[in-house]
């Protein structure tokens, strides 16, 4: 991918590779937003923490985010009320609202300069207002001061918008840089194997009482079975200059809707979503470019990039114990492209669990929660999709297969990458691993 604007003029200092054996209280795998926040909270409470990062701090999906810190996660509250009842939706809303406040508190306490700003978040539609009206009611039932309006800053002919007040934005990597300074982090230290309390990288080992998987997609298949419960979705971002300025941010719920936020002088347009590994028939930037040309003809593209996130069948992350069979392992994944608040919620839930305190949100985010109807349908669809793609492996000409579970790969011409349609692992044109759950490069005879 080309580089996101967050990396411009920012360099996070390099850390050593792990080349020794260390004993600690908690070993965290992954130095993205979830891993760093969890490490920060645990260290604050006096525990010894070691973070192992396969690449560099913030080099995963966190560098590709649009970094809206919000409780407004698309049309989530109506869905939550349907699947988990009003109490579940309330729990989700309070955990997310608290996460926004926690960002503000930490930024204040640690004197972090990261362009944090409070603003409102809007969903908009140009079609029937039914969905937004239902969402407004469900959001209010969940305790959010949501209101319907027709007034937005964007020059779009909308029929309605749903406003959540007091949300926020920031610069994710400036925040990560500041928070990571006091943490014990090893870079270029990919975790290859975990047995009980022992975590192994190529050149070192960590013995830990607790192990946290904050590595985006958990790469251990059994126990946990996360590969059966997650898929990945990719989205594309265009940073426009000379477009317009916005005080708040927006997300369109119609098929041609995009997400909009301001970041300094750039207007970020995000969309073009597809399941990772899906065959592309058109440029994923088509909608962005058309909208930019129509609404802001004098604007130009200053940067573009893409990222992906793990999706759960019912739209709620998995945060908590990894599996009943591994009581000292914990997981934070399935953020559904809302990983800023979800990372903060993960840090709170996981640090509470590790410190032996009860935590809010434990029930709805519990990774082994009971399956609702939508989750069962999602599991089945996901399983069928995997079987369909995996069966192509049996056709001899499909040679490029993923080193995770052998699914045949597809080529993404926009990114110049091989992608797994089953679980979302990615490889560059030379077969080098870019992102998991796979842990190994492609076999060169597969190229
Ligand atoms: C286009 C797009 C826009 C988004 N916009 C928003 C938004 O506006 N607001 C919002 O809330 N969320 C947003 N998200 C979601 C958010 O960016 C992610 O959910 C979040 O960044 C995930 O953070 P993470 O720490 O879980 O993962 P990552 O940032 O990917 O961190 C995981 C780290 O683990 C490391 N790792 C992996 N395997 C190993 C291993 N074996 N050993 C050691 N290290 C390992 C990786 O190198 C990586 O650095 C967006 C997502 C996308 C795709």
Image (spheres, grey):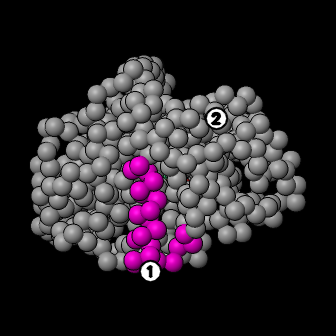
Label 1 packing within 10 angstroms: few (<14), some (14-19), many (20+): few
Q: Position of residue 174 (x, y in %)?
A: 50, 72
Separation of marks 2 and 1 at Cα, in angstroms: 38 Å
Residue 357 versus residue 363 in the image, above or below? below
Q: Is mark 2 within 8 Å of ligand 1?
A: no
Which residue is located at x 55 percent, y 57 percent? 167
Among numbered discs 2 and 1, the one appearing first in the sequence: 1
Figure quadrant of residue 227: top left
Q: Which mark is residue 413?
A: none
Is residue 4 something one can see in this rendering?
A: no
> Hey, which quadrant is residue 311 in on the image?
top left
27 displayed left or right of 413: left
Q: Which mark is drawn over residue 111?
A: 1
Q: Nearer the viewer, mark 2 or mark 1?
A: 2
Residue wearing tag 2? 132
Secondary-structure class at tag 1: loop
From the top left corner, tell me how far across and down residue 206 is, in percent. Answer: 16, 62
Question: Which region of the structure is painted magenta?
Answer: 94-116
Residue drawn at (14%, 60%), measured in percent from left and top? 208
Q: Is residue 124 left or right of residue 291?
A: left
* Main SS, magenta residues: helix
């Amino acid at each position: 991918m080309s580089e996101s604007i967050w990396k411009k003029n920012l360099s996070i200092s390099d850390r050593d590779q792990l080349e020794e054996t260390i004993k600690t209280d908690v070993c965290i795998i992954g130095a993205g937003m979830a891993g760093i926040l969890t490490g920060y909270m645990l260290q604050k409470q006096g525990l010894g923490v070691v973070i192992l990062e396969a690449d560099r701090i913030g080099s995963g999906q966190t560098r590709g985010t649009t970094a809206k810190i919000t409780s407004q996660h698309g049309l989530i509250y109506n869905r939550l009320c349907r699947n988990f009842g009003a109490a579940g939706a309330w729990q989700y809303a309070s955990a997310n609202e608290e996460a926004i406040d926690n960002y503000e508190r930490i930024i204040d306490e640690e004197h972090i300069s990261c362009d944090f700003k409070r603003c409102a978040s809007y969903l908009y539609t140009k079609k029937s207002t039914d969905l937004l009206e239902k969402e407004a009611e469900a959001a209010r039932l969940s305790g959010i001061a949501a209101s319907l309006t027709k007034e937005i800053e964007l020059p779009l002919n909308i029929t309605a918008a749903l406003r959540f007040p007091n949300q926020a934005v920031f610069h994710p990597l400036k925040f990560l840089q500041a928070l990571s300074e006091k943490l014990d982090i090893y870079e270029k230290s990919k975790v290859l194997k975990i047995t009980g309390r022992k975590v192994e990288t190529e050149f070192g080992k960590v013995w830990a009482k607790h192990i946290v998987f904050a590595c985006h997609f958990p790469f251990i298949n059994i126990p946990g079975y996360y590969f059966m419960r997650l898929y990945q979705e990719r989205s594309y971002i265009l940073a426009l200059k000379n477009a317009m300025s916005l005080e708040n941010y927006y997300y369109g719920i119609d098929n041609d809707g995009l997400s909009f936020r301001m970041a300094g002088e750039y207007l970020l347009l995000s969309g073009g979503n597809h399941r990772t590994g899906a065959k592309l028939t058109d440029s994923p930037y088509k909608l962005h470019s058309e909208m930019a040309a129509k609404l802001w003809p004098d604007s130009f593209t200053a940067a573009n990039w893409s990222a992906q996130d793990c999706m759960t069948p019912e739209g709620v992350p998995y945060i908590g114990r990894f599996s009943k069979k591994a009581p000292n392992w914990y997981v934070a994944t399935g953020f559904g492209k809302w990983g800023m608040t979800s990372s903060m919620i993960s840090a709170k839930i996981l640090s509470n669990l590790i410190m032996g305190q009860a935590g809010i949100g434990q029930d709805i985010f519990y990774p082994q929660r009971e399956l609702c109807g939508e989750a069962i349908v999602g599991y089945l669809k996901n399983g069928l999709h995997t079987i369909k793609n995996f069966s192509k492996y049996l056709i001899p000409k499909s040679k490029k297969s993923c080193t995770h579970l052998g699914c045949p790969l597809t080529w993404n011409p926009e990114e110049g990458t091989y992608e797994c349609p089953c679980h979302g692992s990615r490889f560059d044109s030379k077969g080098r691993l870019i992102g998991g759950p796979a842990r190994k490069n492609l076999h060169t005879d597969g190229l």
